[in-house]
Image: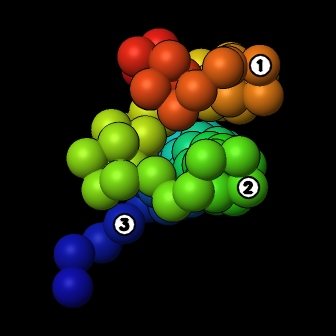
């Protein structure tokens, strides 16, 4: 085993601490981003389900092609707009033409 001076040991220890701190910060940042992304997807899914229920109440079940298009909408604001439009549309066809 090679001889390590006290200065080298202190340098290694300082580097180790800096590495741990940087790793924690990066991990926290990635974890927060992942959490936000997952929360957004859960919120989008909840709005999609609400849209489907409201459509069912007004005009019956939404056909598969429109369900697939709805599933591709990934922005909360846009899903909110679709829900609002659903509540005021005069027909299912009119509403489906908005997305």
Q: Looking at the image, tell me whether mark 1 or mark 2 is earlier in sequence order.
A: 2
Residue 3's label in the rendered image is none
Q: Residues within 10 Å of mark 3 (few under 14, many from 20)?
A: few
Q: Residue furthest bottom?
A: 1
Task: Locate residue 45, reporting x and y percent.
Answer: 60, 54
Residue 57's label in the rendered image is 2
CA distance separating discs 3 and 1: 77 Å
Q: Looking at the image, tell me whether mark 3 or mark 2 is earlier in sequence order.
A: 3
Name which residue lies at 78% across and 28% down.
Answer: 87
Element marked by disc 1: helix
On screen, residue 65 versus residue 78, left or right, reads: left
* Of marks 3 and 1, the one in the foreground: 1
- The residue singled out by tag 3 in the image is 4
* Relative height, residue 35 to residue 81 (above, below): below
Q: Are marks 1 and 2 in contact (CB under 8 Å)?
A: no
Quarter of the rendering occupied by the N terminus: bottom left
- The residue singled out by tag 1 in the image is 88
CA distance separating discs 3 and 2: 76 Å
Q: Residues within 10 Å of mark 1 (few under 14, many from 20)?
A: few
* Relative height, residue 36 to residue 31 (above, below): above
Q: Nearer the viewer, residue 21 or 45?
A: 45
Task: Locate residue 47, reporting x and y percent.
Answer: 69, 46
Does residue 22 show up?
no
Name which residue lies at 68% across and 28% down.
Answer: 86
Name which residue lies at 66% across and 20% down.
Answer: 90
């Amino acid at each position: 085993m090679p001889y390590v001076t006290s200065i080298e040991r202190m340098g290694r220890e300082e580097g180790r601490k800096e590495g741990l701190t940087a790793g924690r910060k990066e991990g926290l940042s990635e974890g927060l981003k992942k959490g936000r992304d997952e929360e957004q997807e859960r919120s989008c899914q909840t709005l999609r389900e609400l849209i489907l229920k409201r459509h069912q109440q007004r005009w019956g079940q939404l056909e598969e092609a429109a369900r697939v298009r709805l599933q591709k909408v990934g922005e909360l604001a846009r899903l909110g707009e679709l829900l609002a439009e659903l509540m005021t549309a005069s027909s299912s066809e009119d509403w489906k033409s908005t997305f």
